[in-house]
């Protein structure tokens, strides 16, 4: 039976029905609700259904015939583009200029058809000839607006708010007066602003470091892995500020001699839906330090956005698409291991697979996964949850970290009984991880059977777009080749002395990374966007050890790390440093950063 001709009017959200995300009836009910309440349809939809921005974006893109543009946290304000446009104006008009590119000025719109039709943009930028309109969701439009113009609800600069603190009296010793100072409106605003600014500067951590006596309290932010000064606060406000933070995460404000930890759900206090993990630590001079980790926004990154090289991407896909086995991501704290695991899970997250995760804490959430947070105080640890998972019909299990023998053993057991198991390790290199796990007491035969692969990872600072490309001279190229090849020294794969080897390597790079067959190197420069450091954001460097039959045999015989390494590189594994060096040829990072994160 064919359906009758559709008299229903098309809407930008019809694509959600085509995708199978909501049904036509569900969509129509939301449209009605939006009409009757005057709310935007997008907000009605997201309040009833778990929709992500990509799904809504795809629908909008299909309707408007314009590309969908997601929120990009690395975009920066440009005085040239945004200085002349008032926030209220662009907000009301529903469009935002983002940046200039060879294909024209990129304009983010809620309704690209209307914006193009009104010809507002060319009138605002008469010097620009080409425009490139894209559509985005309401939520991401607002996020981008906040990023480029600051959060209006808490207007004013941090310095202005600091000056406003002047009226507050200091009450270091008196708890009740301290609590009242801590709830002072100006102080509350100031503390919120510190968190909001830190978030907008993409800081991962906020460090509050009081000094005794009359010395100022320093506040530093960690951005892209490096601490930088943010602001200094006069001594008389330090305890009120610390008390305010303790109140925000429900800590005992009278307890100043013991370390405490808690969590801030910031949406209860300010205009951002973020979570902060807080640790207070008493330090010398009777003061308390506070360190806050801004937890990631909670959405997984697509696997193809992880900067895996083409070869590593192919090998990773081939490995994780196996029905059962063990896969580890290894690296030090802060190397993005959990992010990578969630990208892998996002790739595997389909209706026909049951995926259990146990994490400490759950930082990224995904619809479709069943996620469990451990609670050591209550005796709920990784091993306990793992055992429960095995009784709960899993296809895939992700274990936040494998530090103890029992968790690793359960992982091996689960994979040998037909499950795909993912976890992280605190080891430096992929080959070293193998021996570390065997040293924990794993049976070499079982472990060799179970293992699919190990991905070692580091994060290196990414070159900002202000980088400058140049053609290296033969001397610079030769020393680059030598440094690259040195990674393989003492293995059969090291053949630099063989005639023509260096040329072969260069030809390979020219073909894969060159521009018109020419290799390019990049200088870091600096601009307003990267605060004149030349770096903006970070990228992953990878070393992927695939457990081939040869590698499995070596594991069974408890071979040395050096032998596993030799075999792996002979079959094409690139070390972290080699992967990083190849990424410098793409202008993604530079040698200085690669050397820095690949210290052995
Ligand atoms: Zn720059």
Image (tube, helix red, strand yellow):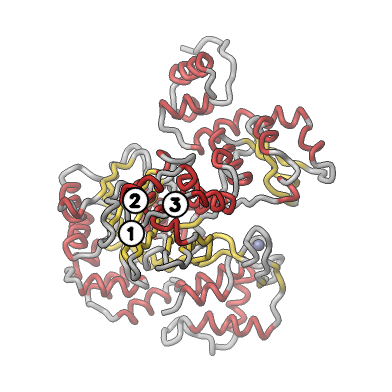
Disc 3 secondary structure class: loop
| Among the 4 quarters of the image, the one containing residue 280 | bottom left
3D distance between C-alphas at marks 2 and 3: 19 Å
Ligand 1 positioned in quadrant: bottom right
Q: Give the image location of residue 207, x and y in percent.
A: 43, 61
Pick the residue in front: 344 or 322.
344
Q: Secondary structure at mark 1?
A: strand
**How many other residues sit within 10 Å of disc 3, few (<14), some (14-19) or many (≥20)?**
some
Q: Distance of mark 1 from mark 2, alpha carbons?
A: 8 Å
Q: In the rendered image, which residue does mark 3 sit on?
A: 169
Q: Earlier in the sequence, mark 3 or mark 1?
A: 3
User: What residue appears at the point 68 percent right and 62 percent down from the top-left corner?
Assistant: 527
Q: Residue at x 63, y 46 (%)?
A: 148
Say which of 123 and 105 sits in front.
123
Image point (67%, 38%), residue name: 87
Labels 1 and 2: the sequence-earlier one: 2
Circle 2 crowding by C-alpha within 10 Å: few under 14, some 14–19, many from 20: many
Farthest residue to the bottom: give it. 497
> What is the x, y in percent for residue 54?
51, 38
Measured in 3D between alpha carbons, the distance from the residue under mark 3 to the one under mark 1, in whole angstroms, is: 23 Å
Badge 3 vs badge 1, beta-carbon distance below 8 Å: no
Q: Is residue 175 left or right of residue 294?
A: left
> Total of numbered circles in the picture?
3
Question: Which residue is denoted by mark 1 in the rendering?
Answer: 280
């Amino acid at each position: 039976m064919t359906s009758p001709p559709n008299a229903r009017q098309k809407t930008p959200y019809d694509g959600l029905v085509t995708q199978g995300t909501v049904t036509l009836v569900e969509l129509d009910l939301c449209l009605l609700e939006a009409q009757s309440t005057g709310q935007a349809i997008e907000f009605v939809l997201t309040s009833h259904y778990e929709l992500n921005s990509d799904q809504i974006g795809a629908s909008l893109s299909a309707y408007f015939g314009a590309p969908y543009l997601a929120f990009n946290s690395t975009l920066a304000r440009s005085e040239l583009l945004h200085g002349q446009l008032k926030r209220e104006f662009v907000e009301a008009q529903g469009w935002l200029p983002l940046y200039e590119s060879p294909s024209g000025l990129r304009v983010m719109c809620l309704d690209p058809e209307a914006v193009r039709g009104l010809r507002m943009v060319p009138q605002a930028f008469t010097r620009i000839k080409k425009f490139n309109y894209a559509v985005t969701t309401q939520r991401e439009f607002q996020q981008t607006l906040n990023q480029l113009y600051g959060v209006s609800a808490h207007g004013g600069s941090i310095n202005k708010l600091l000056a406003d603190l002047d009226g507050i009296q200091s009450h270091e010793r008196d708890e009740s007066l301290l609590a009242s100072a801590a709830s002072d409106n100006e102080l509350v605003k100031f503390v919120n602003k510190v968190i909001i600014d830190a978030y907008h500067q993409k800081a991962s951590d906020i460090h509050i470091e009081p000094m005794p006596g009359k010395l100022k309290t320093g506040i530093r932010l960690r951005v892209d892995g490096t601490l930088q000064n943010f602001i200094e606060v006069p001594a008389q406000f330090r305890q009120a500020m610390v008390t305010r933070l303790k109140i925000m995460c429900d800590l005992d404000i009278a307890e100043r001699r013991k370390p405490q930890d808690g969590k801030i759900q910031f949406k209860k206090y300010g205009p951002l839906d973020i979570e902060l993990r807080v640790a207070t630590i008493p330090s010398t001079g009777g003061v308390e330090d506070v360190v806050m980790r801004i937890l990631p926004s909670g959405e997984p990154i697509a696997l193809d956005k992880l900067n895996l090289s083409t070869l590593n991407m192919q090998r990773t896909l081939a490995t994780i698409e196996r029905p059962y086995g063990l896969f580890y991501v290894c690296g030090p704290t802060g190397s993005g291991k959990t992010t990578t695991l969630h990208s892998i899970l996002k790739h595997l997250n389909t209706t026909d697979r049951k995926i259990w995760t146990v994490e400490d804490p759950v930082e990224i959430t995904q619809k479709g996964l069943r996620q469990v947070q451990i609670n050591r105080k209550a005796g709920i640890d990784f091993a306990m949850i793992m055992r429960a998972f095995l009784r709960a019909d899993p296809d895939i299990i992700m274990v936040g970290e494998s530090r103890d023998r029992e968790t690793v053993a359960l992982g091996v057991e689960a994979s040998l009984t037909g499950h795909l198991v993912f976890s992280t390790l605190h080891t430096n290199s992929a080959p070293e991880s193998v021996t570390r796990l065997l040293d924990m007491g794993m049976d070499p035969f079982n472990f060799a059977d179970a293992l699919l692969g190990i991905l070692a990872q580091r994060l290196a600072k990414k070159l900002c777009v202000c980088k400058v490309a140049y053609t290296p001279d033969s001397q610079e190229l030769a020393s680059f080749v030598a440094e690259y090849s040195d990674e393989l020294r003492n293995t059969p794969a090291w053949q630099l002395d063989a005639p023509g080897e260096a040329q072969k390597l260069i030809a390979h790079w020219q073909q894969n990374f060159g521009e018109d067959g020419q290799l390019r190197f990049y200088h870091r420069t600096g601009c307003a966007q990267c605060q004149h450091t030349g770096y903006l954001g970070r990228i992953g460097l990878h070393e992927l050890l695939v457990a081939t039959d040869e590698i499995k045999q070596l594991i069974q015989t408890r071979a040395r790390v050096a032998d596993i390494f030799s075999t792996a590189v002979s079959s094409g594994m690139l070390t972290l440093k080699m992967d990083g060096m190849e990424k410098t040829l793409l202008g993604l990072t530079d040698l200085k950063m690669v050397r820095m994160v690949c210290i052995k």
